[in-house]
């Protein structure tokens, strides 16, 4: 099988490409990536020279290019991960999220039809469901109530993919996963940001009271679920993917400090993220029952391994934190680090 992975040089995409080459060695994998600030060729440096892996730099919104790549590599299936993925950035500037996540997804879907792509896997997110109260979990039939520009753009893309299934008979599968963690995550997201700040003895900015809950999924468990969903998922169906590891943010931040042997005095409670969803929790019983998927990683061990990876791979995050990212961090992000009580 020949698979096109969009966003293959980002966090989940690069872990997915590596996973597919190792676990599905008979598949040819092509990565289409624009290499925004979040995409990095280094993430897949170890695949250099691998005849089963090809990289194309380009935008999913470029219809001509996408059709060319699909035909050139006789693509059978698309795994669509390319996106603007950071909620905070979507609050500062939603436009890029609409261009890539909504329009880009539609262009990609349109390019799949005349080129004979057999299956389209849309990687969506649990954020499309909005926020939960203290109990319960999202099922695939929970209503979509996205609350940030990011999640609204992902909900649009998710629904556009499903609509292409209904209207044009495309073979579409949608997955909605919880928060991923693991190696190669860009250090603007909670876990790597906290690790990097702690290593610099800089304050760790915890939004609000730190009681917001996320349901953590090891990226390798996610990759396994995506491969299974592509192979065996039922056409037109949605699958929730979650690691069953609900944790309040403050617990994670304290856990990171403890692994690194750094003091809790580095924690700084700052002004809350506008519209901050309080709690996410995934009910993954459908993918477990229908497709036999089950996560292999436990959160505490996975977190410790991830933190150690960042400690051991300092040159990687020092490089990705330079340039455009640093500019964003210094101007937009730091400006919002006001105390929670302000
Ligand atoms: P990421 O930001 O690390 O990577 C995104 C990748 O997409 C980058 O390599 C970037 O260069 C590329 N890209 C961006 N715009 C593009 C465009 N117009 N054309 C081609 N490539 C483009 O994101 P991630 O965390 O790896 O997330 C991957 C996917 O998984 C996204 O669709 C995201 O919404 C979804 N998701 C992520 C999480 C998470 O916890 N990280 C959870 C749920 C869903
Ligand atoms: O500095 C911070 N301080 C803080 O308290 C940052 C960056 C985050 N947080 C909080 C906000 C969230 O409650 O930590 C939690 C996790 O935040 P992020 O890492 O920004 O992730 P989140 O907003 O939950 O979204 C992520 O999971 C769902 C991904 O970025 C999305 O792409 C995915 O769809």
Image: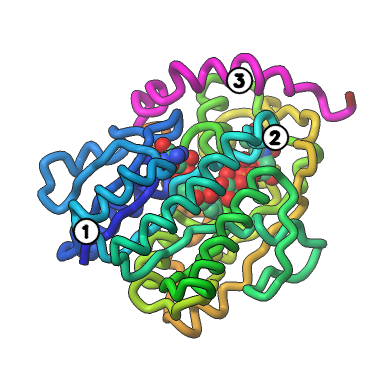
Check if residue 289 falls in the magenta segment. no
> Dot 3: few (<14), some (14–19), or many (≥20) neighbours within 10 Å?
some
Per the image, label 2 sits on a secondary structure element best described as helix
Principal SS element in the magenta part? helix
Q: Position of residue 279 (x, y in %)?
A: 74, 56
Q: Nearer the viewer, residue 5 or 131?
A: 5
Give neighbour class at mark 2: few <14, some 14-19, many 20+ (Cα, 10 Å). Answer: some
Determine whether, in the image, residue 299 is placed left or right of residue 120.
right
The N terminus, quarter of image? bottom left
Q: Is residue 204 above or below residue 157?
A: above
Q: Which residue is mark 3?
A: 202
Mark 1 vs 2: CB contact within 8 A: no
Q: Give the mark toward the camera: 1 or 3.
A: 1
Residue drawn at x 29%, y 33% is 42
Query: Which residue is labeled 2 in the image?
Result: 91
The image position of residue 310, as x and y in percent, is: 42, 34
Element under disc 3: loop
Residue to which mark 1 is pinned? 22
> Would residue 31 be found to the left or right of residue 327 on screen?
left
Marks 2 and 3: which is nearer the front? Answer: 2
Q: CA distance from mark 1 to mark 2?
A: 37 Å
The residues colored magenta run: 313-341
Residue lying at the far bottom of the rendered structure: 289
**Residue 246 image-quadrant placement:** bottom right
Precedes in sequence: disc 1 or disc 3: 1
Residue at point 64%, 15% (across, down):
331
């Amino acid at each position: 099988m020949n698979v096109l992975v969009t966003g293959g040089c980002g966090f989940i995409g690069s872990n997915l490409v590596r996973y597919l080459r190792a676990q599905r060695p008979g598949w040819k994998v092509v990565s289409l990536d624009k290499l925004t600030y979040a995409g990095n060729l280094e993430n897949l440096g170890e695949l250099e020279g691998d005849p089963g892996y090809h990289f194309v730099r380009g935008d999913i919104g470029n219809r001509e290019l996408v059709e060319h790549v699909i035909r050139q590599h006789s693509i059978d299936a698309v795994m669509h991960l390319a996106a603007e993925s950071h909620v905070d950035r979507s609050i500062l500037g939603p436009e890029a999220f609409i261009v890539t996540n909504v329009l880009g997804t539609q262009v990609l879907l349109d390019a799949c039809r005349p080129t004979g792509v057999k299956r389209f896997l849309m990687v969506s997110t649990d954020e499309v469901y909005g926020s939960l109260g203290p109990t319960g979990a999202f099922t695939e039939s929970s209503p979509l109530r996205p609350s940030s520009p990011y999640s609204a753009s992902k909900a649009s893309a998710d629904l556009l993919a499903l609509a292409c299934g209904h209207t044009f008979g495309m073979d579409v599968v949608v997955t909605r996963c919880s928060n991923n963690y693991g190696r190669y995550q860009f250090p603007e997201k909670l876990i790597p940001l906290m690790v990097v700040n702690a290593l610099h003895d800089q304050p760790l900015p915890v939004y609000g009271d730190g009681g917001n809950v996320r349901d953590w999924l090891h990226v390798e468990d996610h990759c396994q679920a995506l491969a299974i969903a592509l192979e065996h998922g039922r056409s037109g169906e949605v699958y929730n993917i979650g690691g069953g590891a609900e944790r309040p943010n403050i617990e994670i931040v304290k856990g990171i400090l403890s692994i690194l042997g750094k003091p809790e005095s580095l924690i700084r409670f700052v002004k809350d993220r506008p519209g901050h969803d309080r709690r996410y929790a995934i009910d993954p019983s459908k993918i477990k029952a229908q497709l036999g998927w089950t996560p292999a990683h436990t959160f505490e061990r996975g977190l410790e391994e991830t933190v150690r990876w960042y400690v051991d791979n300092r040159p990687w995050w020092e490089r990705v934190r330079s340039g455009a990212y640093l500019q964003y961090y210094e101007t937009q992000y730091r400006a919002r680090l006001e105390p929670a009580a302000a």
